[in-house]
Image: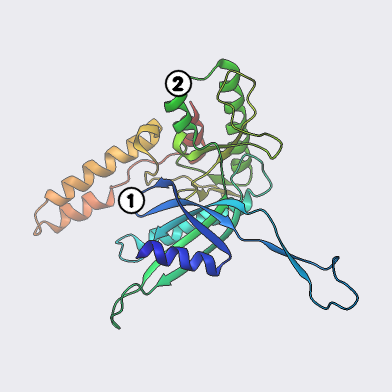
């Protein structure tokens, strides 16, 4: 039912949804879609013919990330992540190593036939389609890369990260699964051999990205852990361990001991970290 509603809503926006799932998470999924484009050709009009011919253009492949916003305890955080992801992709629209944003919107589906049924709100982020998949999927399928290809991948990744840091954005969730691979229009397919790398790296999944540096406020340090545990820097791990340890201790405290609870909760996030350095650590 929900998939039908997604398909119907995307058709209203001018997109055709396919059954090919590109990725999946706890609250959403990424599907391959096509942009429906038609052009009106006025060059073939006759003198006595007032009608124009409609020429169908080749369908443009895209990717659509759908995330559930309603019925979640962290709804406000999910909306904030959606806003930052759109913001990061928009700011990085001029860089070749950042996935390009095509469209975005939020829509509430009335899935039930009962009048008092609460609607399901979803966020939609439509982006360019990376035809070669993720770097993690390629590594699992083909094994370790040659040195020349590894260096080229690393160069493109660092170019994208450098640009993000230049405009004051920290990714905060860099990992192989969030690095996409695609090719330019002149290349017929993906390079899976030992030839010089023809693929273009695209940084994606900016839901945890945050605006860190600005001319007015300077560098802002974070004390709340974010990202994937296996890729966290030691500074973030320190915040993560302290947060979980102190939270567990606070939960075990008795209800009557208000002073202990206030003391423990006040030091939940004891240390802070530099998100720019955390991004660089994730590359290593």
x 36%, y 40%: residue: 271
**Can residue 9 be seen here?**
yes
x 34%, y 40%: residue: 239
Q: Is residue 254 left or right of residue 34?
A: left
| Quadrant hosting residue 152 | top right
Q: Give coordinates of residue 278: x percent, y percent.
A: 46, 35
**Can residue 69 be seen here?**
no
Q: Give coordinates of residue 195: x percent, y percent.
A: 63, 19
Helix, strand or loop status at disc 1? loop
Helix, strand or loop status at disc 2? loop
Relative depth, front residue between 149 and 217: 149
| Quadrant hosting residue 257 | bottom left
Q: Give coordinates of residue 281: x percent, y percent.
A: 47, 30
Numbered mark located on residue 143 in the image: 2
State the quadrant of the N terminus. Answer: bottom left
User: How many numbered discs, if any?
Assistant: 2
x 48%, y 46%: residue: 205
How many neighbours does mark 2 have within 10 angstroms: few (below 14), some (14-19), or many (20 or more)?
A: few
Q: Residue 214, relative to residue 79: is it above or below?
A: above
Relative depth, front residue between 91 and 243: 91
Q: First in sequence, mark 2 or 1: give its number.
A: 1
Most distant residue in the bottom direction: 115
Give the residue pinned by disc 1: 26
Q: Residue 64, relative to residue 166: is it above or below?
A: below
Most distant residue in the right direction: 47
**Marks 2 and 1 close (CB-CB < 8 Å):** no
Relative depth, front residue between 154 and 252: 154
Distance CA(mark 2)–CA(mark 1): 28 Å
Q: Is residue 261 left or right of residue 110?
A: left
Q: Is residue 161 left or right of residue 43?
A: left
How many neighbours does mark 1 have within 10 angstroms: few (below 14), some (14-19), or many (20 or more)?
A: few
Q: Give coordinates of residue 180: x percent, y percent.
A: 53, 38
């Amino acid at each position: 039912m929900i998939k039908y509603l997604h398909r119907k809503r995307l058709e209203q926006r001018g997109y055709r949804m396919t059954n090919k799932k590109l990725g999946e998470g706890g609250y959403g999924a990424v599907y391959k879609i096509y942009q429906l484009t038609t052009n009106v050709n006025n060059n073939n009009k006759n003198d006595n013919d007032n009608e124009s011919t409609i020429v169908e253009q080749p369908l443009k492949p895209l990717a659509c990330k759908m995330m559930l916003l309603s019925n979640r305890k962290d709804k406000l955080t999910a909306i904030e992540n959606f806003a930052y992801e759109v913001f990061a992709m928009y700011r990085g629209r001029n860089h070749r190593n950042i996935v390009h944003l095509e469209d975005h919107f939020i829509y509430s589906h009335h899935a039930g036939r009962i009048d008092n049924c609460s609607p399901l709100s979803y966020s939609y982020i439509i982006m360019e389609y990376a035809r070669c998949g993720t770097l993690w999927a390629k590594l699992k399928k083909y094994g370790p890369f040659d040195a020349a290809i590894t260096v080229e991948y690393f160069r493109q990744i660092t170019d994208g990260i450098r640009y993000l840091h230049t405009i004051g954005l920290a990714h905060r969730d860099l990992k192989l699964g969030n690095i996409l691979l695609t090719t330019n229009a002149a290349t017929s397919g993906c390079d899976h051999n030992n030839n010089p790398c023809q693929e273009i790296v695209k940084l994606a999944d900016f839901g945890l990205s945050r605006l860190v540096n600005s001319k007015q406020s300077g560098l802002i340090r974070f004390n709340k852990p974010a990202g994937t545990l296996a890729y966290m820097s030691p500074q973030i791990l320190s915040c993560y361990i302290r947060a979980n340890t102190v939270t567990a201790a606070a939960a075990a405290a008795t209800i009557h001991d208000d002073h202990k609870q206030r003391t423990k909760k006040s030091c939940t996030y004891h240390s802070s970290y530099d998100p720019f350095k955390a991004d660089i650590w994730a590359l290593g």
